[in-house]
């Protein structure tokens, strides 16, 4: 296809810069390695609000500790479940790519003391740049999958301004790199499926495989991109001999293989999932939540309540944005669950997203024979991400919407097409609404963080 228009290129730069600005703002507003109280958790032994050694971004302390180990030991850490410091080191089983990159940036900038705020700022802003790379990957995934600039730019605006994605890009975490690598792998899968010449297919498939392999060096969830790559290879079998496509796709396995071999040797499991489960036993688990639901005498089946109200509604709202350690909610009480909360902001945005998804289903129904193959690959990536999320919550209660963000590129395509149908492919009205809804919500969230974090640090939380 032809290169994007000048307007589309300008808009892409604008939304990349906006994402960088929002991510940097979240980084600067969020305390680093600072203890305090959690408004949504109780201290079982002493009563009152639970105290945590870190109230900033989820698991940020442990991600930073991994970087500290690399800087000090010049070797990869090993996770030891049940060790006295396991609460500080439970990310040690993760693949090393993100941490090695961050350690390299810390060394170059001279900020190698993980305990200092200056290290935190450098590492967070570096991740904001990684987040920008993900936004650009999402744009090209949508553009090459649909060959529509309006869909690509509307979907990109959603991804760039989504408050939870902005906050995640402004934290020390391997999630933004995972989102970026999966998005770029999917983008080149889409390009391969849209190519006509063998040499163009070859180049796109090799790049898709490289990014898929790098996603597996970032997080085990990166396997999703390899499955997307396999689906793409199968779809290309009538255009290119299967042996060739399989050879190109195998590059992904070769890139990930060293880490898988190391994990097998150390943990007896190539993905290190066994040791992760052993180390994660102290986390909230499904039976605990079911017991809580039963004790509350809530009407209906506890199992249904768990999946609908706890996992479903919790994840849907946190997909939009919940900050700190899943503790700062954008509603009147600041609580995750409270009958008196109207939750109008969350409900309004969820309704807007739902309308876009329904419109996309209408598109599928009306044009299912004409739907580009790349969109089906994207939907496969989305379904696999959701299934992983459901599977995890069948054991542990981890209803964090950020676990669904690896499928942000397919979500951008779905919503770009859906909202495009609603606005009859008129770019400017659709774009204005998306910017107002998601950009406005990010601005509102940022306006609340300073006072909310200050209250948690001082312990001056009042009942709401």
Image (cartoon, helix red, strand yellow):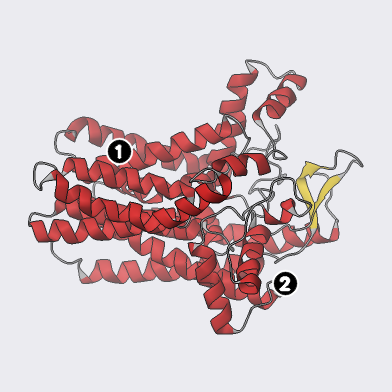
Residue nearest the viewer, comparing 327 with 157: 327
Q: Quick check: 238 left or right of 409?
A: left
Q: Of label 2 and label 1, which has the lower sequence position?
A: 2
Q: Residues within 10 Å of mark 2 (few under 14, many from 20)?
A: some
Does residue 422 appear left or right of residue 101 in this picture? Answer: left
Q: Is residue 92 visible?
A: yes
The residue sitting at 70% across, 64% down in the picture is 450
Q: Which residue is mark 2?
A: 115
Distance (Cα) linking label 2 and label 1: 47 Å
Residue 74 on image: x %, y % = 59, 71
Give the residue at x 48% y 40%.
350
Say above or below: 86 vs 9.
Answer: above
Q: How many marks?
A: 2
The quadrant in which the N terminus is found is: bottom left
Crowd tier of the residue under label 1, counting other residues whose Cα lies within 10 Å: few below 14, some 14–19, many 20 or above: many
Q: Nearer the viewer, residue 56 or 186?
A: 186
Q: Secondary structure at mark 1?
A: helix
Q: Nearer the viewer, residue 458 or 123?
A: 123
Q: Residue 310 at what x, y percent from top left?
A: 62, 32
Which numbered circle lies on residue 360?
1
Can residue 148 be seen by looking at this rendering?
A: no
């Amino acid at each position: 296809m032809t290169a994007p228009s000048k307007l589309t290129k300008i808009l892409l730069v604008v939304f990349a810069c906006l994402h960088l600005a929002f991510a940097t703002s979240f980084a600067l507003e969020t305390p680093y390695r600072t203890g305090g109280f959690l408004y949504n958790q109780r201290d079982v032994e002493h009563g009152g609000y639970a105290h945590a050694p870190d109230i900033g971004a989820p698991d940020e302390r442990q991600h930073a500790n991994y970087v500290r180990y690399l800087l000090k030991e010049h070797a990869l850490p090993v996770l030891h479940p049940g060790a006295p410091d396991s609460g500080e080191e439970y990310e040690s089983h993760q693949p090393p790519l993100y941490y090695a990159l961050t350690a390299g940036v810390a060394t170059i900038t001279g900020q190698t003391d993980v305990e200092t705020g200056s290290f935190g700022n450098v590492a967070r802003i570096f991740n904001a740049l990684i987040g920008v790379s993900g936004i650009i990957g999402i744009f090209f995934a949508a553009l090459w999958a649909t060959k529509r600039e309006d869909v690509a730019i509307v979907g990109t605006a959603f991804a760039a301004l989504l408050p939870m994605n902005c906050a995640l890009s402004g934290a020390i975490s391997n999630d933004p790199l995972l989102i970026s690598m999966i998005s770029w792998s999917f983008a080149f899968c889409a390009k391969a499926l849209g190519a006509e010449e063998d040499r163009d297919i070859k180049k796109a498939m090799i790049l898709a495989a490289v990014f898929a392999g790098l996603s597996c060096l970032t997080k085990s969830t990166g396997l999703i991109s390899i499955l997307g790559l396999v689906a793409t290879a199968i779809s290309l079998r009538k255009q290119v001999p299967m042996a060739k496509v399989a050879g190109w796709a195998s590059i992904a396995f070769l890139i990930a293989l060293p880490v898988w071999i190391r994990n097998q040797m150390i943990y007896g499991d190539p993905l290190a999932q066994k040791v992760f489960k052993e180390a994660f036993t102290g986390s909230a688990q499904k039976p605990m939540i079911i017991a809580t639901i039963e004790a509350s005498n809530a009407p209906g089946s506890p199992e249904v309540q768990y999946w609908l109200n706890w996992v479903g509604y919790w994840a849907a709202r946190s997909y939009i944005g919940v900050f700190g350690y899943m503790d700062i909610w954008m509603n009147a009480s600041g609580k995750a669950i409270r009958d008196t909360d109207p939750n109008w902001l969350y409900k309004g945005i969820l309704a807007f997203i739902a309308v876009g998804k329904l419109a996309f289903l209408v598109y599928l129904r009306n044009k299912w024979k004409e739907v580009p193959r790349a969109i089906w690959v994207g939907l496969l990536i989305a379904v696999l991400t959701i299934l992983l999320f459901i599977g995890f919550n069948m054991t542990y209660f981890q209803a964090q919407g950020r676990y669904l963000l690896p499928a942000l590129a397919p979500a951008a395509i779905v919503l770009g097409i859906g909202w495009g149908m609603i606005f009859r492919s008129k770019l400017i009205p659709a774009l204005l609404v998306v910017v107002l809804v998601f950009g406005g919500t990010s601005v509102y969230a940022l306006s609340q963080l300073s006072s909310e974090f200050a209250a948690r640090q001082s312990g001056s939380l009042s009942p709401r």
